[in-house]
Amino acid sequence: MARYTCSFIIAVPIDHLQQLLIDVLESCRLDIIYNTGDYLMARETPGQVSFGKLVTVEVLIDKSTATEREVRCNLVIKNEELPLQVDNHCHQMFYTVHQAISENRHWQLVESVAG
């Protein structure tokens, strides 16, 4: 199973963050399949790649450490594909989502850590 993680601290009012994250994920061709107040799950739309390569993105919004202006988010991007190549489909989607979050004009990225 391919799995990539990253953590962001974003300067944005917490009440706007969830909808902005949904917009970012949808702009990356991901459908929101689960949504609570502090957790989002999105999945790549079938049809472009084989079923085993479909990417799932999980976003945890850490409200316990959030301030009025900064929020930490942890992302896990994964699929069933074995990561036999460095530039596999899951890694490509990780890069796409990471860039979309990093370059979003609706917030300021304070910190980014990819693992």
Image (tube, rainbow, N blue to C red):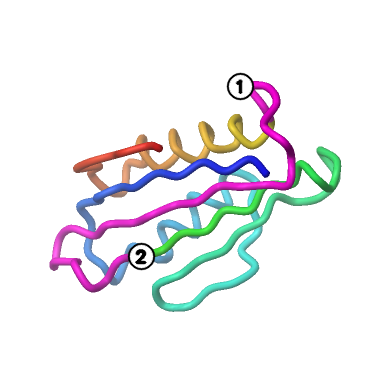
Q: Are marks 2 and 1 in contact (CB under 8 Å)?
A: no
Direction top: furthest residue: 86
Task: Report the residue marked by disc 2.
Answer: 61
Per the rendered image, the range of residues in magenta is 62-88
Q: Nearer the viewer, residue 11 or 93?
A: 93
Q: Position of residue 93 (x, y in %)?
A: 60, 36
Amino acid carrying mark 2 in the image: Ile
- What residue sits 34% from the left and 47% below the top? 7
- What residue sits 63% from the left and 53% below the top? 56
Say whether residue 70 is magenta: yes
Q: Is residue 107 left or right of residue 43?
A: left
**Counting residues from the N terminus, which is met first, the one under dot 2 or under dot 1?**
2
- What residue sits 24% from the left and 60% below the top? 71
Tell me the number on the disc at residue 46. Answer: none
Does residue 32 sit above or below 1 in this rendering?
below
Quarter of the image with the C terminus is top left
Q: Is residue 111 left or right of residue 5?
A: left
Q: Report helix, strand or loop for mark 2.
A: strand
Task: Report the residue marked by disc 1.
Answer: 86
Q: Position of residue 22 (x, y in %)?
A: 50, 59
Does residue 67 sit above or below 98 in this rendering?
below
Amino acid carrying mark 1 in the image: Val
Q: Nearer the viewer, residue 104 or 45?
A: 45
Does residue 51 sit above or below 95 in this rendering?
below
